[in-house]
Structure formats: C-alpha cells, structure tokens
Image: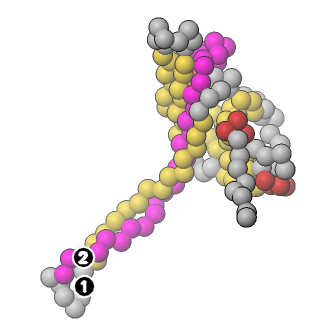
C-alpha cells in the first residue's frame, strides 16, 4: 500500500518581505490558523459553428489569457501586526511575499514568490471568545514564480 505523502497545515507558511535590500521575509504571527493559496486562470471564450450544419448548437472554446494567485490567512490577531497590516491594506504599493510549503526533507520544499496587494484585512470578536480573530486576503500583482526542492533560496 502506498500512503499519500501529506503536509501538516502548519507547514504552509506566508512570509512577508520587509522591502529592504537584501530583503528579509518573516511570517505574520496573526496568520496562526487557516492558510490558503489559490492559483487562478482567466479565460476568454468564443463559440465555433459547425460548417456542415450551421443550425447545430455551437461548442464554446476557451483560451487562458491571464494568471493570478490569491493568498488567504486567518488566526488570533497579534496586536503588533495590526498597524503594518492596516498600512499595507491602505497603500497602493505591493509587498513581496513567499508562500512556503515546507517539509522535513529539503527536496520536497516548495516556495511561491511574488508581489501582492493586501486587499482584505478584517478583525472580529464576540462574547463567546475572549480573543479577536483576523482574516487577510492577498492578490498577486505580476508573475508568481515557483521554486522546488534543492533550488529553494532559503528566504
């Protein structure tokens, strides 16, 4: 039997760049629970007629025209992250980020590097929980590159 090689949720890590040279990347403490990365493709479509029978319903063809990546995260809000997150969300500037799918075996590590806009930062609390939780959403701006295994830069 061959079992699936799984990765623990804690090994999917968002690291945000500090914008300095050389750039240093560190995780946000607020992203201490749910994390996600979504790879998207936008398409254009056209319907193609059947020349032998123009009355037939036409099939749609689709072509990919652009790619993007969305990153999400959530957790208990760390107060030291609030000001930098609000500032980033309100800024027109992107920040470089790395999403790491880590592993004990260096050959299995994957990093996705790109520039991102912080499009959502929310905080919420309720009487049923003594702590404030937060959610973030990032959208890529430009190419996101993937590095696999031995080629990972150790950022």
Contact, CB < 8 Å: mark 2 with mark 1? yes
The single residue placed furthest to the bottom in the displayed view is 52
Crowding near the residue tagged with mark 1, few <14, some 14–19, many ≥20 C-alpha atoms within 10 Å: few
Q: Is residue 71 magenta?
A: yes
For marks 2 and 1, the one nearer the N-term is: 1
Res. 50 mark:
1
Task: Specify the principal SS of the magenta part.
Answer: strand
Q: Label for residue 58?
A: 2
**Quadrant location, the C terminus:** top right
**x then y, percent, for residue 97:** 67, 38
**Is 106 in front, or is 126?**
126
Q: Which residues are magenta?
A: 56-83
- The residue sitting at 19% across, 81% down in the picture is 56
Depth order, front residue of 12/67: 12
Determine whether the residue tagged by mark 2 lies in a helix, strand or loop. loop
List the single residue furthest toward the left. Answer: 55
x, y (%) of residue 140?
55, 43
Q: Residue at x 58, y 40 (%)?
A: 36
Asked if 120 appears above or below 81 in the picture, the reply is below
């Amino acid at each position: 039997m061959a079992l699936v090689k799984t990765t623990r949720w804690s090994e999917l890590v968002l690291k945000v760049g500090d914008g300095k040279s050389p750039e240093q990347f560190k995780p946000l403490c607020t992203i201490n629970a749910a994390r996600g990365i979504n790879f998207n493709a936008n398409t254009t479509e056209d319907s193609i007629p059947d020349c032998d029978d123009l009355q037939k319903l036409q099939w749609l063809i689709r072509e990919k025209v652009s790619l993007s990546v969305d990153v999400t995260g959530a957790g208990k809000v760390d107060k030291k992250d609030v000001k930098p997150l609000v500032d980033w969300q309100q800024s027109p500037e992107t920040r470089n980020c790395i999403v790491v799918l880590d592993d004990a075996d260096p050959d299995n590590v994957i990093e996705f590097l790109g520039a991102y806009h912080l499009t959502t930062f929310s905080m919420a609390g309720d009487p049923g929980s003594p702590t404030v939780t937060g959610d973030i959403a990032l959208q890529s701006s430009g190419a996101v590159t993937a590095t696999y295994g031995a080629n990972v830069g150790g950022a």
